[in-house]
Amino acid sequence: MTATDTPPYDAIVLAGGAARRLGGADKPAVRVGGRPLLDRVLAACAGAEQTVVVAAPRATSRPVRWTREDPPGGGPVAALGAGLRHSTAAYAVVLSADLPFLEEATVARLLSVLSASDADAALLTDADGRDQPLVAAYRTTALRHALSALAGDEQGLTGLPLRRLTAALNLTRVPDPRASFDCDTWDDIADARARIREHGHVLDEWISAVKDELGIDLDVDFRLLLDVARDAAHGVARPAAPLTTFLVGYAAAQGKGGPEAVAEAAHKAAALALRWAEETNAPGNPAPDTPAGGVPGSEPPAPGPGR
């Protein structure tokens, strides 16, 4: 199952915690890879029918619905109950706001596993095999029933640990140490920032950050653009590389504007760069250090009388 054929779902993002292990910092706003942690999570659940964020409103990379538990600071179970009140889908993906490596494909995988099973929820487990109920997909009917049973106590949902909720549900588990990595401490933040910049991930992360910053929702084969840049640099001149990729993007925007338009413009620019290089290297052209009308290494002839 891919992100395009997941069952309809709502996303509930819990972003109102106190972040005590970060010294009370505004954790959803902490940047990893140039983007706030909350925006990284919102990108991973962009396919939701609606996204409810349980926290005080703030600027985000895409529109969401805001709500708060009552009283604020009542803990994750109370926050989950507040967010679920706004959900109308059969499935809800529940996420914390501190997951730097969560991707849309992981959300799709959780929904796929859950919809193919008889379980009430599918959740990730971390590198130590521990359940992560705030990186999980739930059947909303079962979740509402479990929350209602817990709310019958005198204190309601305030202050309840998540294990009280998951103990009442039939769970299936999906191991994923990377996607389940969350940022509870400044050491976790530093680790996430270092891993973002690892060679195998840095270009994907950078392209995602740029698209998010510019408000672009476009899947482009950036390796094709790198090939165009290489051909322009080698066949024309090094400064031609960034200029050519800019013009490719501009041409695509002037046309159909989708990935196909980018690919078409990139192929045209690459072919032009190759033709340019062929002319430069064609037989009969002067060597690069050959002055016009002279021989390699010589000075151009001095002008004669009357010239």
Image: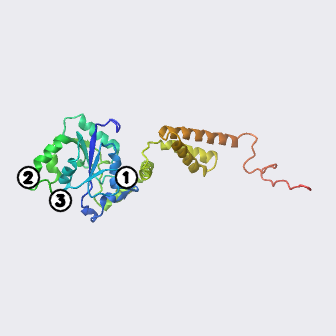
Q: Amino acid at mark 3?
A: Pro
- Which sits in the foreground, 152 or 36? 152
Identify residue type, mark 1.
Answer: Ser
Q: CA distance from mark 2 to mark 3?
A: 16 Å
Q: SS for tag 3? A: loop
Expressed as whole percent of the image width and height from the top left, the position of residue 253 reads 51, 44
Label 1 neighbour load within 10 Å: few <14, some 14-19, many 20+: some
Mark 2 vs mark 1: which is more N-terminal? Answer: 1
User: What x and y, as percent, mark residue 162?
Assistant: 17, 51
Q: Does residue 306 appear in this view?
A: yes
Q: Residue furthest left?
A: 154
Number of the label disc, if any, that sits on residue 71: 3
**Nearest-to-viewer mark from 2 and 1:** 1
| The disc label shown at residue 153, or none | 2
Of the pair 240 and 261, the residue shown nearer to us? 261
In the image, farthest residue toward the bottom = 23
> Which of pointers 2 and 3 indicates the residue nearer the eye?
3
Dots 2 and 3: beta carbons under 8 Å? no
Which numbered marker is on residue 61? 1
Number of the label disc, if any, that sits on residue 261: none
- Tell me where residue 218 appears, x and y as whole percent: 44, 43
Amino acid type assigned to the residue bearing label 2 in the image: Asp
